Amino acid sequence: MADALVIVGASYAGVQLAASARELGFDAPIVLLGDEAHAPYQRPPLSKGLLTGKTAVDQLALRGPDFFAEQNIDLRLGTRATALDLAARRVQLADGSHLDYGWLALATGARCRPLNVPGASLQGVHELRTLDDALAVHAAVSGASQATRACVVGGGFIGLEVAAALTAAGALVTVLEGQTRLLARSFPPAMSDYVAAAHRQRGVALELGRGVQALLANAAGHVQSVLLDDGRQLACELVVLGIGVLPNVELAEAAGIACAGGILVDACGRTSAPNVLAAGDVANMELPHGRLRLESIQAANDGARAAASVLVGQPQPLTAVPWFWSEQHDLKLQMAGIPAHGDQTVLRGDMADDRFTLFYLRDGAVVAAHSVNRPAEHMLARKLIAGRAQIPAETLADPAADLKPFSILQPRG
């Protein structure tokens, strides 16, 4: 199968790349390698509905049971790639066999950043990246020895989603964040303060600007407390780590493919190596607003579609406005665009009502928006951002003002 497309990684990007390749008329063999035993599954419920019991495992399938056979996609689960031979166009597998390729796509994703402190490997300490991780956390709060006190290390999106889900499951939850505010990488101080207040109001305790010195065990080797850098100990039976991820670039780096904070790709997903593409969380993509590694389903799917276009000789660079969403308690947070330091912020609505949008203006144009419980406004904001709509701040701030006339795409400068 020297003309085959071999895709390493069977999550969103890998599955979408295979599907898009078929949709665009790519008719050579496609082999999709997944190193997990589970068929490709949805990731968002892992930190939300699966932990509360609202979502069952059999509801997680990313595609229907017949999809891969119908599309003539050879899905191989529990199969790990161990090395790439770019000169021979060959993928070495863990079982000693190999696959030859005409095109190779790397959708190797990312892994949890480890917490390098004593006790990080104790019983009761969990990461949350895979379905097996989520099932282990769910068992910890729903089994016979149900954990009633939990510490979540990390105040990013995953950590806060887990905190909300564990609170809904009946646990007393404390979030430990080393920075002095939540979501500092993504949100301005006003949004960070809003999210912090929302969690506190819903029963989550926050320890901001605090580091973890160690995780301490009981006599049975199970975690029983977290030692903070100020000397305090927080009792808990469950610890969930959510301190970010590291892109899985090892295969690419060992083969000599250019990497820096991810696998470096252009706006079509092309790497520095001939006939090698990359998409998803591992890809550091060159976009109109700069080089970014975007960790979202939307970015994975859009990047995969762009990469698939290369396979059929009709490259279509990724131009879609980045967007992302998060559910925490009864709040649906939706983000669009990439805000930057110095952007003018305009609030539309009232934060106290848990229904508002914070718009970001740059040189008078809408470049980003953060919405809470305003899905329709979020969809409109994406159009405004795509069109670089010029809207007076006072108009944006007026809840009665109609923004739809501004959503007609304007020429890009």
Image (cartoon, rainbow, N blue to C red):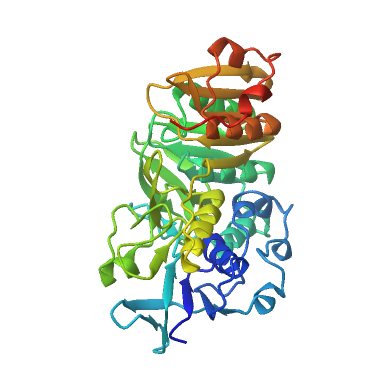
In depth, the one of 81 and 314 nearer the eye is 314
**Residue furthest to the bottom:** 97
Instruction: Judge whether 170 appears above or below 251 on screen.
Output: above
Q: Residue at x 66, y 29 (%)?
A: 377
Count of numbered labels shown in the rendering: 0
Asked where in the image residue 189 lies, by quadrant, the reply is top left
In depth, the one of 95 and 221 nearer the eye is 95
- Asked if residue 77 can be seen in this view, the reply is no
In this picture, residue 120 sits left or right of residue 65: left
Instruction: Judge whether 275 appears above or below 212 on screen.
Output: below
If the image is split into quadrants, where does the C terminus sit? top left
Residue 322 percent location from the top left of the image: 51, 42
Residue 8 percent location from the top left of the image: 46, 71
Instruction: Judge whether 355 appears above or below 130 on screen.
Output: above
Instruction: Judge whether 165 appears above or below 251 on screen.
Output: above
- Asked if residue 155 can be seen in this view, the reply is yes
Q: Residue at x 38, y 71 (%)?
A: 275
Residue 198 percent location from the top left of the image: 60, 27
Asked where in the image residue 38 lies, by quadrant, the reply is bottom right
Q: Residue at x 47, y 38 (%)?
A: 155
Q: Residue at x 49, y 27 (%)?
A: 192
In depth, the one of 397 and 332 nearer the eye is 397
Residue 241 percent location from the top left of the image: 46, 50
